[in-house]
Image: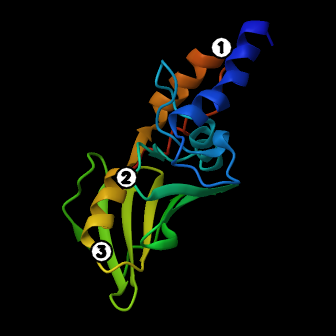
Amino acid sequence: MSAARGTRRAAAPAVLALLLAGCVAPGVPAGQVPACAIGDRGAAASGVVLMAQAVPTASWVPCVEGLPLGWHVAGLDVRSGSGRFWLDSDRDGIHAIEVRLTGRCDTEEATEIRSDRPGMRRFEQVAQVSPQYHGRRYYSFGGGCITVVFRLAGDSRGEPLALATQAIGALRRADLAEQVRQASGDRLELDPPADAGGTP
């Protein structure tokens, strides 16, 4: 590895910590925050890359664009075949929202509604309304699925649902792979298999 390349990689967590100060819970390493963009180039954080590697068929990868006041990233868990991160809220509780990336999802008991994301089908499922709002939102696409799980304890559900979901973005796998190549000079195994772009 060249000295310049090593410097770029070492500096990334420090830059991320500055940009997301106040949005990260104590104990969560800055480099694990799945931010959609960090630094001058606006490249995705390493947490997003890890999720893309974990689900090699997924044509989209979830990420955090920015969080409203009172919300912060509380954790990231990535393993072969799946990746997830979750958000805590000072009003809606611990683990109020969890975002999962998997190769597929079961939407049989969910209702399909008009999608707010191009290239994805959207499904909604409400499991409980009171005393805690518990529901799931699925975004199904070629080779994968993003599931947003809500466990909201606050009195007002509309505002946190809108604000928190607006803060959750998604990056195209091809764009993410190109960012990694430009930043590191290396080819990262992020390109999906030839059969991963089928109909959701």
The figure's colour scheme reads rainbow
Q: Residue at x 48, y 18 (%)?
A: 40
Secondary structure beneath label 3: loop
Query: How many numbered discs?
Result: 3
Disc 2 + disc 3, Cβ < 8 Å? no
Q: Are marks 3 and 1 in contact (CB under 8 Å)?
A: no
* Image spot of residue 58 (x, y percent): 50, 47
Q: Say which residue label 1 marks.
A: 185
Q: Is residue 24 left or right of residue 66?
A: right
- In this rendered view, identify the residue nearer to me: 194 or 42: 42
Question: What's under tag 2, amino acid-wise?
Answer: Pro
Circle 3 sits on which residue? Answer: 157
Residue at x 35%, y 52% (from the top left corner): 199
Q: Please, what secondary structure does the residue beneath circle 2 have?
A: loop
- Vertical arrangement, residue 191 with respect to residue 61, above or below: above
Q: Residue at x 71, y 54 (%)?
A: 27
Q: Position of residue 112 (x, y in %)?
A: 25, 70
Q: Quadrant of residue 52?
A: top right
- Height in image: 152 above or below 102? below
